[in-house]
């Protein structure tokens, strides 16, 4: 009787430990990348290449996606404030149904700014890869988003980005001054040099004379605010 009671108590402790471990894994998002191939110094999960993309008319940001009346015509993107992207980072299961309403998804875009501290750049980049990896587990057409900072980020920031795939970038805020514009164009050339994408999706502004600088298809979608209200 005493032995049986001891066994039950031990089993309960083991179950509690497992639950606690599961909570820790869920909090740090380790459960998402448990079966992923991790690459590079910062352990980015290797993302799946997307060889073809469905025809869509526009891109809709996460904060506007719940109100979109024709999701079948749109791609869902995360080119919005970090505080909005935090919603899916903190409660991803809540967004599964929303994500699956759209035929195309663009991967996460937590900010990687030139004036951010290096650890902040690394963490946000890792979060982009982790959540894009998760999206690729629940949706067949998730195009990786390539966020980058200045040239110091080039040696590591594309680790895990697939070769020969469609890749998306945003030019929002990159035309505010010459330095940002130059940095954006440099990063785009580096992306093409390293990953040889099948094509690039641009969200935002992209001058027509720049298209000839790249030997691959480029699709430009205006920002949601410009499409809806004629803003930037």
Image (cartoon, helix red, strand yellow):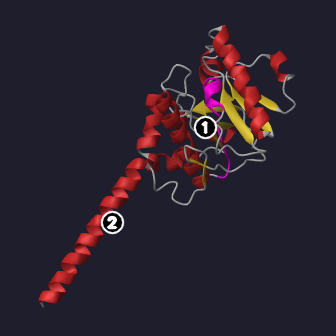
Label 2: state its secondary structure.
helix
- Image spot of residue 224 (x, y percent): 61, 24
Which quadrant does the C terminus fall into?
A: top right
Check the image and name the residue furthest to the top: 177
Which residue is depicted at the point 23% across and 73% down? 12
- Image spot of residue 165 (x, y percent): 76, 44
Check the image and name the residue furthest to the bottom: 1
Q: Which mark is residue 62?
A: none
Residue receiving disc 2: 18
- Image spot of residue 88 (x, y percent): 46, 41
Instruction: Report if residue 220 is visible in the image.
Output: no
Rendered position, 128 above or below 188: below
Q: Which residues are magenta?
A: 140-154
For the residue pair 211 and 104, the one nearer the viewer reads as 211
Q: Which mark is residue 76?
A: 1
Label 1: state its secondary structure.
strand
Which quadrant does the N terminus fall into?
A: bottom left
143 drawn magenta? yes
Which residue is depicted at the point 26% across and 66% down? 16
The rendered magenta stretch, by its main secondary structure, is classed as loop
């Amino acid at each position: 009787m005493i032995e049986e009671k001891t066994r039950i108590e031990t089993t309960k402790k083991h179950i509690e430990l497992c639950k606690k471990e599961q909570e820790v894994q869920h909090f740090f998002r380790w459960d998402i990348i448990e079966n992923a191939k991790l690459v590079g110094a910062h352990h980015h999960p290797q993302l799946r290449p997307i060889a073809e993309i469905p025809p869509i008319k526009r891109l809709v940001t996460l904060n506007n996606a719940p109100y979109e009346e024709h999701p079948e015509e749109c791609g869902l993107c995360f080119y919005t404030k970090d505080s909005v992207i935090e919603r899916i980072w903190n409660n991803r299961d809540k967004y599964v149904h929303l994500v699956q309403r759209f035929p195309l998804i663009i991967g996460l875009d937590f900010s990687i700014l030139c004036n951010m501290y290096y650890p902040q750049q690394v963490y946000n980049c890792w979060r982009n890869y982790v959540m894009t990896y998760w999206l690729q587990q629940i949706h067949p057409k998730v195009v990786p988003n390539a966020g980058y900072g200045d040239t110091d980020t080039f040696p590591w920031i594309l680790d895990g980005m697939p070769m020969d795939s469609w890749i998306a970038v945003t030019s929002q805020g990159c035309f505010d001054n010459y330095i940002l514009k130059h940095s954006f164009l440099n990063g785009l050339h580096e992306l093409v040099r390293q990953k040889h994408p099948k094509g690039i999706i641009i969200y935002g502004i992209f001058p027509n004379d720049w298209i000839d600088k790249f030997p691959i298809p480029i699709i430009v979608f205006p920002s949601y605010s410009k499409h809806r209200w004629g803003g930037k």
